[in-house]
Image (tube, helix red, strand yellow):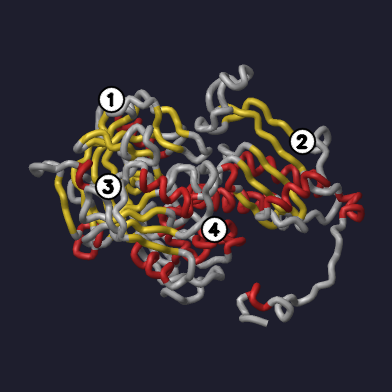
Amino acid sequence: MSSENASYTVVQPGEPHPLGWKVPPIDDLRSAIEHLKTIPGQYIETDREIDPRAELAGVYRHIGAGATVMRPTRVGPAMTFNAVKGYPHSRVLVGLLASRERVSHLLGAPARELGIQMGKARLTVTPPVAVGREAALCQEVVHRADEPGFDLRRLLPAPTNTPEDAGPFFCMGLVLGSDPDDRDNVDVTIHRLCVQGPDELSIFFAPGRHIDAFRQKAEARGEALAVSVNMGLDPAIYIGAGFEAPTTPFGFDELCVAGGLRGRPVELVECISVAQKAIARAEIVIEGEILPNKRVAEDQNTNTGKAMPEFPGYTGDANPSLPVIRVKAVTTRKDPILQTLVGPGEEHVSLAGIPTEASIYNACQDALPGLVKNVYAHSAGGGKFLAVLQVAKRKAGDDGNARQAALIALAVYRELKNVILVDDDVDLFDTDDVLWAMQTRYQGDLDTMFLQGVTGHVLDPSQSPLYNPRLAAKGTTCKTVFDCTAPFHLCEHFVRAQFLDVDPRPFAPALFGEGRS
């Protein structure tokens, strides 16, 4: 989307955003880290040497990965490893977005309203702007692939999450590509990028990704597609890029959402080696071209048969035939910070789930104003498979409207598998409360809706004919709605026990941070 003649509001750090939240003083990764340092319990770092091969993820699994990671794990602080074995000039940050509370601190909206905030930002188009190379922090240091000794494997500490990974992966590489016929038609998406050689990466495209459509168009002509891989970013950029069609249709630049979140545009700079743009305040940019008609096995260097841990909690199979990015240059800030994540962790929930919440909330507000009060893309589904919708029934027809809202959710986010409906007296972010509603306001034979043979997600191992022979293809599933709301005509029978509203702080001040009694 072109930024020419665009209209947007510039919001200074700390000023109230016109849509109702306070923008924290963040415009890149380093300012995000500095902001977190002011908030107890949100950030730690260590000077103890770490091996990026499996050890780093193995450590952070215990400190803050959370979500679908095999137990023991927990939600904890973001962490920077300052001493990376074999890479004396690099640092690695993991878990920046691996906590809903931390995302709240980084974006400015209350944790329970992040989806609503994202929905407003999607409707507040703030296009990116171009800056000159003199203003591009991402180009402070330049490494060209045609220089003697260039080797991506020795330059950047791409981690492996487990010992059986196909190879080192860049897990937070935001790929920026554009339509071969229209450079203003831009898409940004995080993809699975495996380091395959000194100047080659394989790239995995989930079905329906817009950059893959650009690649296919270029490949049909025998042409390469120029891309930039941007890492170490303002967290608003990563979160904004999590939107998918139809919320962000083909031709919509998701960088506009990050601009809406911050109240000011994302800055872009021309790459030095390919005809593409890069995010000017990134820590690291890999410039390259997706080659036409070239494919490699993802695990060609290890033969493990595995790719890497994915958001459902399982290690995916290595893909036998993936497109290749030929690296032309790497540009960085001085002493760059490589940002990564632990695949199945809470960070993926934030990246995928908060935009999912926004997409569902906006669509339901358009169709059924006021019925859906909030949406939570649950951690158990990696932010993709499970959504809890909180509804406020006001009339008899809302029994059907609530179920219609669930169908809207499934339509607006195709990778969603299960929807749970709860009333507005249920805390949708409290799994115990949601399961309580299921135990007392749900009968399986009356309150379950099945939608069979619908497109889902290829990374769910149950979505396969091997699991269910009635499924036509991998990535097809039965979608389910669990209506755990009380029928409107029986609502007086489902009133929760009402307790006296008493201020507990004078009786237990230490529990509420008010000193000792």
282 to the left or right of 117:
left
Name the quadrant of the C terminus: bottom right
Q: Position of residue 435 (x, y in %)?
A: 73, 47
Residue type pointed to by label 2: Thr
- Give the quarter of the image for residue 178: top left
- What element does badge 1 sit on? strand
Q: Vertical placement of 284 versus 420: above or below?
A: below
Give the label on residue 293, or none.
1
Q: Earlier in the sequence, mark 3 or mark 4?
A: 4
- What element does badge 4 sit on? helix
Please give the name of the residue rendered at 81% of the width and 42% of the height, measured from the top-left corner.
442
Tag 2 and tag 4, C-beta contact below 8 Å: no
422 to the left or right of 11:
right
Q: Position of residue 30 (x, y in %)?
A: 34, 64
For the residues labelled 1 and 4, the Cα–Cα distance comes to 41 Å
Give the label on residue 448, or none.
2
Residue type pointed to by label 1: Asn
Tag 3 residue:
157
For the residues labelled 3 and 4, the Cα–Cα distance comes to 27 Å
Residue nearest the observer in this picture, 312 or 112 = 312
Q: Earlier in the sequence, mark 1 or mark 3?
A: 3
Residue nearest the observer in this picture, 111 or 27 = 111
Identity of the residue furthest to the left in this view = 148
Residue type pointed to by label 4: Arg
Few, some or many C-alpha atoms within 10 Å of disc 4 (few <14, some 14-19, many ≥20)? some
Please give the name of the residue rendered at 74% of the width and 34% of the height, measured from the top-left corner.
449
Tag 3 and tag 4, C-beta contact below 8 Å: no
Tag 4 residue:
100
Q: Vertical placement of 196 versus 500: above or below?
A: above
